[in-house]
Amino acid sequence: MFHDIVKKNRSYRRFYEHEKIARQDLLKLIDYARLTPSGANWQALKYYLACEPELNSQVFPTLAWAGYFKAWPGPVAGERPAAYIVIVQDEEYKMSSPFDCGIAAQTILLGAVEMGLGGCMFGSIQRSKLKEVLNIPDHQEILLAIAIGKPKEQIVIEEIPLAGDIKYWRDDNQIHHVPKRRLEDIILN
């Protein structure tokens, strides 16, 4: 069911790194994104793919892994993503709608869940360093990066009251807890 896919689509930050992801699987995810609606049908997004360990090891340090875990530098070797998708646009070919990137990224992640994978979107990126790693031309702007892999962590959604703390956290068993506002607290009418 769609509800189950949405619930499983969490921001995973630890993976079974040895579970490789074929380039063909990444292309399938990009194909899903390619089919989504686009403002004025401009289809301005382009994608850089990484699924080789050597390239992945260069992409990894360009991403900030968990804003609420200040002392955590990200997953250790063996728990890192098996692949990355970097979403870019040509600076002379701007999107008609700033929402296109989010729609594409969410579609990629929902497709990953359907494939038994998981991922995490990154907006906090060392963009100049990542452009160098991927040999991205100056006229292309990095919008988002998506880490993808077979999830190694358990994530639990916790309902919170409207004024509750929204910060995600890990318990002593390394179960990742994600507070979400209740449905009745976000409906305005």
Image (cartoon, rainbow, N blue to C red):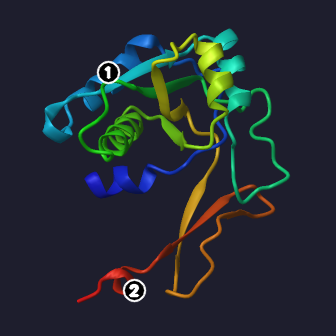
Label 1 vs 2, first from the N-terminus = 1
Q: Is residue 44 left or right of residue 186?
A: left
> Where is residue 83 drawn, in percent x and y?
55, 23
Foreground: 173 or 78? 78
Toward the left, the furthest residue is 40
Three-letter residue code for mark 1? Lys
Q: What kind of element bears circle 2?
A: helix
> In which quadrant of the rendered view does residue 187 lie?
bottom left
The residue identified by callout 1 is: 28
Q: Residues within 10 Å of mark 1 (few under 14, many from 20)?
A: some
Q: Say which element carries label 1.
A: helix
- Across and down, in percent, residue 124 comes to 62, 43
In this rendering, the count of numbered labels is 2
Above or below, comparing residue 67 to residue 52 in the picture: below
Kindly identify the residue that appears in the image at 80 percent across and 34 percent down.
Answer: 76
Q: Which residue is mark 2?
A: 185
Near-viewer residue (184 or 99): 99
Crowd around label 2: few <14 · some 14–19 · many ≥20 (10 Å): few
Quadrant placement of the C terminus: bottom left
Horizontal and vertical percent for residue 152?
A: 64, 40
> Is residue 1 visible to the viewer in this orientation of the structure?
no
